Image (tube, rainbow, N blue to C red):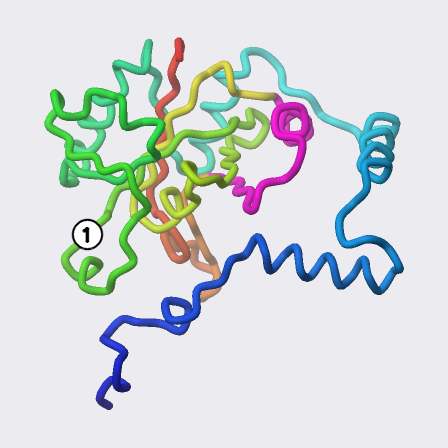
Amino acid sequence: MPAAAGHGPGITFRDRHPMNTDSARDRIFARIRAAQGRPAKPTQGEREAVRDYLARHPQGPRPGVAGDLVEAFSVQARKMASTVERVASMSDVPAAVGHYLDGLALPRRAVAWPALGMLDWRSHDIAVECRPPLRDADADRDHGDLVGITGCFCAIAETGSLMLLSGPDAFASGALLPETHIAVVPVARIVADLEDAFALMRSERGELPRATNIISGPSRTGDIEQTIVLGAHGPYRVHVVLVEQA
């Protein structure tokens, strides 16, 4: 069937009608609050009441993480099919990434978060562009953006997970669309458990961002014959570069 007039191949409804998810969420919450007879935005008193409740509310049982958090995270991450390596400093990251890509016969090119653009990728013969992955169908057919390199808000030792918070320069697509996701994680950002991760978020950010992604290894599914398949809904490789001094 020929494409509709004015719409080229690969153009989706979302491309033609982009949605601002922040404003959509605000409108939904405003309607709910209006139905309750409350103002569209939470008052300062409401925010303080929530903070007070969280501070006073007893937490549930937490098993605790024994020993070194870095080692505990590494063990759990490998159990989730992530690969992990440690480097001394941020300046060592490009060499580590290049070695990883070569080991998988992947091209030495990637998209990355802008905060990682200052690393010396060029000296290690890695072409890095600081932008979200391309969604163009032609680029996908040409094997466009196969590798995404991101930072990480924090890592969770108990589960071997990465917590990524979205933002203008921390686009979630960098960790979700490419086939290979490489996360650069300072060891100082490893916390014991999910409770500590959310406590850190409240302390440093105050509010939830538009998207919070908790990544526990490659994407996987067992929908077909209960056989686990990696990469069904996202990357089928997750590689974590732990940085001792960042």
* 21 up-or-down from 184: above or below: below
Horizontal and vertical percent for residue 39? 82, 53
Horizontal and vertical percent for residue 134? 27, 53
Residue displayed at 55% across by 46% down: 211
Residue 208 forms part of the magenta stretch: yes
Amino acid type indicated by mark 1: Gly
Where residue 119 sits, quadrant-wise, is top left
- Is 229 on the left-hand or right-hand side of 63? left
The N terminus, quarter of image = bottom left
Q: Secondary structure at mark 1?
A: loop
Residue displayed at 83% across by 26% down: 55
Magenta residue span = 192-216
Q: Quick one: 72 or 123, which is closer to the camera?
A: 123
Where residue 245 sits, quadrant-wise, is top left
Pointer 1 residue: 144
- Is 96 on the left-hand or right-hand side of 158? left
Horizontal and vertical percent for residue 94? 22, 22
Q: Quick one: 237 or 165, which is closer to the camera?
A: 165
- Is 49 on the left-hand or right-hand side of 105? right
